[in-house]
Amino acid sequence: MNITFDIGELAKLFLLINVLFAFKIYKERNELKWFELSLIWALFIQIIAKTIAHYQGNNLPFLHLYTIFEFTLISLFYKEILFDNIKLGRYFYYFVGVIMLIIIGNSLFFESIYGYNSNAKGLTQIIIISYAVIYFFNRISIDVVQSNLVLNRINAAVLLYYASSLFIFIFAKFLLENSDIMFGYFWDFNALMYLTFQVLIFIATWRLVFPAFTEIKSEN
């Protein structure tokens, strides 16, 4: 049993807990619904991918499928918490639609569904990082008392994970073809950052699930 497996399994455990939290709080925090759906989607795909891998099958087609819905759900999340409040929001659906077509076209014509979709993952991660950075600077001007700590913490988790894993996915095919050892190291790092991401989401939402442990209720 290697370190990637250990960290990966722990990350899946936290993902499962976060999905259970999502079912608990989905009626209370409507602005979180798209992000919660992205967690449910991630768990669903991981279950399918692990099942296929168990039977020695190629589960990479599900990475292509995961990418398009991951991007869409997280985009809708930021549409609700950020872009509804700025003028660019009116063009947001057109933008998301164009990117979805690019992702689909990439899988159909450029990167086989049986290999890593580095182009699509790189593009979508850059866009998601941009969402998180725009949100961050948008919140700087808001008084700390009025700011939403749950959303701020989720945004920080998104920024940390997607920024740290960006180059891993961009160069995944290159590393796999040229250095199995380096690919393994990078994948270990990605597993660690994904675990960190899920732990940060857990920290951001557990106060909503267990409000009795919240020192200042108005923080949420």
Image: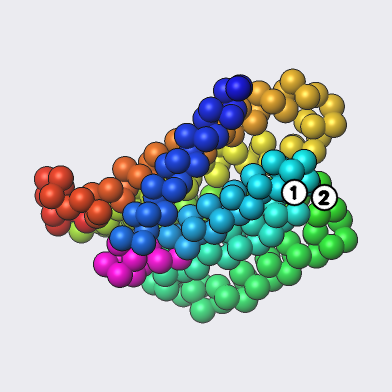
Q: Which residue is mark 1?
A: 60
Q: Residue at x 36, y 61 (%)?
A: 23
Residue shown at the point (79%, 38%) measured from the top left = 173
Answer whether labels 1 and 2 touch (C-beta < 8 Å).
yes
- Quadrant where the image shows the N terminus: top right
- Residue 190 falls left or right of residue 31: right
Q: Residues within 10 Å of mark 2 (few under 14, many from 20)?
A: some
| 183 w.r.t. 35: above or below | above
Q: Amino acid at mark 2?
A: Tyr
Q: How is the image coloured?
A: rainbow
The location of residue 77, given as percent across then percent down, is 46, 64
Q: Which residues are magenta?
A: 25-34
Q: Can residue 190 be seen by looking at this rendering? A: yes
In front: 72, or 26?
Answer: 26
* Residue 28 lies within the magenta run: yes
Q: Residue at x 66, y 23 (%)?
A: 185
Residue type, numbered disc 1: Leu
Residue behind mark 2: 114
- Which residue reaches farthest right? 109
Please state if 197 lies on the left or on the right of 54 as rendered. left
- The image shows residue 26 at horizontal and vertical percentages of 34, 66
Would you identify the image quadrant in which residue 141 lies? bottom left
